[in-house]
Image (spheres, helix red, strand yellow):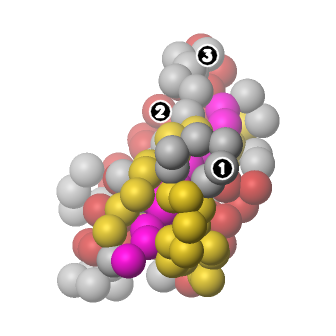
Amino acid sequence: MLDEFVWGKVGRISPEAPVPVVEVSGESFYPGGAANVARNLREFTAHVGVVGMIGRDRGGEQLRHLLAEQKIDTSACSISPDFPTIVKTRIIARQQQVVRVDREKILAPDEKQIESVVANVRKMLPEIDGI
């Protein structure tokens, strides 16, 4: 999961609907969900890895890049074009969240994907201290 924050200010109300118009001044990305837990664990130990599904899409590329920057191992992740990466976008204006936009499609992994993840976990078992 990828968390996206869009920062800006409200200067007016939309003429199309009674909603604020946010003028974007910046954006930032962070690992979300279990990837955020891994990022927090990285503060306490030298080796942290994640196992799961990451989409072969823009969000997945961004997530893998962020985890690599934190030196979090993603080699046990299954990268799939069939699994869109979950992205949660928070629009922030005047230090308050205006809205959250979730881009997610909950899909069940197929047998091959499950077998791949299980095989990766089995390979890692001798080297890990916690799951």
Q: From which residue to which does the magenta span run?
A: 83-94
Mark in front: 2 vs 1: 1
Name the residue: 28% across, 74% down: 40
Does the residue at mark 3 contact the one at mark 1 (Cβ under 8 Å)? no
Q: Position of residue 60 (x, y in %)?
A: 66, 54
Mark in front: 2 vs 3: 3
Relative to 12, 125 lies left or right: left
Figure quadrant of residue 127: bottom left
Name the residue: 36% across, 72% down: 39
- Crowding at dot 1, Cα within 10 Å, few <14 / some 14-19 / many 20+, comes out as few
**Separation of residues labelled 3 and 1 (CA atoms):** 46 Å
* Residue type, numbered disc 3: Asp
* Residue type, numbered disc 1: Pro
Comes first in the chain, label 2 or label 1? 1
Mark in front: 3 vs 1: 1
- Crowding at dot 2, Cα within 10 Å, few <14 / some 14-19 / many 20+, comes out as some
Asked which secondary structure carries label 1, the reply is loop
Residue bearing mark 2: 118
Asked which secondary structure carries label 2, the reply is helix
Q: Is residue 59 above or below residue 117?
A: below
* Residue type, numbered disc 2: Val
Residue bearing mark 3: 110
Residue bearing mark 1: 15
Comes first in the chain, label 3 or label 1? 1
Name the residue: 43% across, 43% down: 121
Relative to 36, 60 lies left or right: right
Q: Position of residue 113 (x, y in %)?
A: 61, 27
Verify whether residue 92 appears in magenta: yes
Relative to 73, 84 lies left or right: right
**Separation of residues labelled 2 and 3 (CA atoms):** 12 Å
Verify whether residue 128 appears in magenta: no
Name the residue: 71% across, 61% down: 61
